[in-house]
Image (spheres, rainbow, N blue to C red):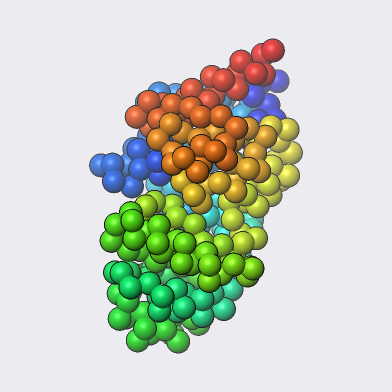
Amino acid sequence: MGIFDGVLICSDWDGSLSCGRLAPGNEVCPENRAAIRYFQENGGRFTVCSGRYPNYILSFRDQVTPNAAVIALNGALIVDPVTQTPLREETLDPTIFSYIDRVLDAFPYPAKFLQYPAGVGVSTTYTREEYERDREKIERIPCYKALLVTDDGEHGEILRDTARKIIAGTGFEAARSWPIGLEFINRESNKGGAVRFLKEKTGADLLVTVGDYENDIPMLEEADIGYAVANAIDEVKAAADRVTRRNNAEGAVAEIIGEIEKIRRK
């Protein structure tokens, strides 16, 4: 029996486990790597819950090797970390595009559109003009999520607020994963539902989640202990149970594993 038996940690990738999408190489620091190995060797389950495709997360297996299913595309896709076989897969309801059209009509600032097709492993980027031109074709492509990207953080907030007003009361959710990127998913496919699914699947008795941005809030709220890293935005810190060190720069996940060990040894 290991000290971490029954513990499942689900960590966001960019800005939480790693330094974020702007950091060269986006690597995981040695302190976090060593702590995760120690956690796993002593009975713990560790995985990543990210907005990225699983092939990107699994490309870092030389640094971090998940031993629970990988949660990708903000919860729309959950895959076995060895075979990449889907355990759960939900594509975006195509009626979202009528709402995205309305968001773009109401948003006067620069925007480009990204689509994350099912079964591909790489996103497709369209300028605003290309999106409008190819709109009917885009709607027919099954995808996990859609994304609008603008030019600065102030416009990112306006984009988010505009979208949330338009999709209020629908089955969709719009949240940023970084200041200028707004992601659209099925509400039932968010990170909260994904970590709940994985907790049930693994039989874990303690679910710990780690995040830094808006799209992480559902999984922080779902957790037994939700951690915001010190570099998280205020909204995320407010949703978390605890605030820990800065992401990869200060070994946030290593600090969390140390705290969990103290809890389990009491």
- Residue 108 is situated, as x and y percent measured from the top left of the image, at 33, 73
Look at the picture and state if 2 lies above or below 145. Answer: above
Camera-side residue of 127 and 158: 158
Q: Which quadrant holds the N terminus?
A: top right
Query: Image check: 133 left or right of 239?
Result: left
Q: How many marks?
A: 0
Camera-side residue of 14 and 39: 14
Look at the picture and state if 130 lies above or below 258. Answer: below
Q: Which residue is located at x 38 percent, y 25 percent? A: 250
Camera-side residue of 236 and 59: 236
- Residue 101 is situated, as x and y percent measured from the top left of the image, at 45, 79
Residue 263 shows in the view:
yes
Residue 60 shows in the view:
no
Outermost residue toward the top in this view: 266
Look at the picture and state if 70 lies above or below 90. Answer: above
Q: Which residue is located at x 63 percent, y 70 percent? A: 170
Look at the picture and state if 174 lies above or below 3. Answer: below
Query: Image check: 135 left or right of 228?
Result: left
Q: Which residue is located at x 37 percent, y 52 percent? A: 179
- Residue 63 is situated, as x and y percent measured from the top left of the image, at 40, 35
Q: Which residue is located at x 31 percent, y 69 percent? A: 109
- Residue 210 is situated, as x and y percent measured from the top left of the image, at 52, 37
Outermost residue toward the left in this view: 24
Q: Which quadrant holds the C terminus?
A: top right
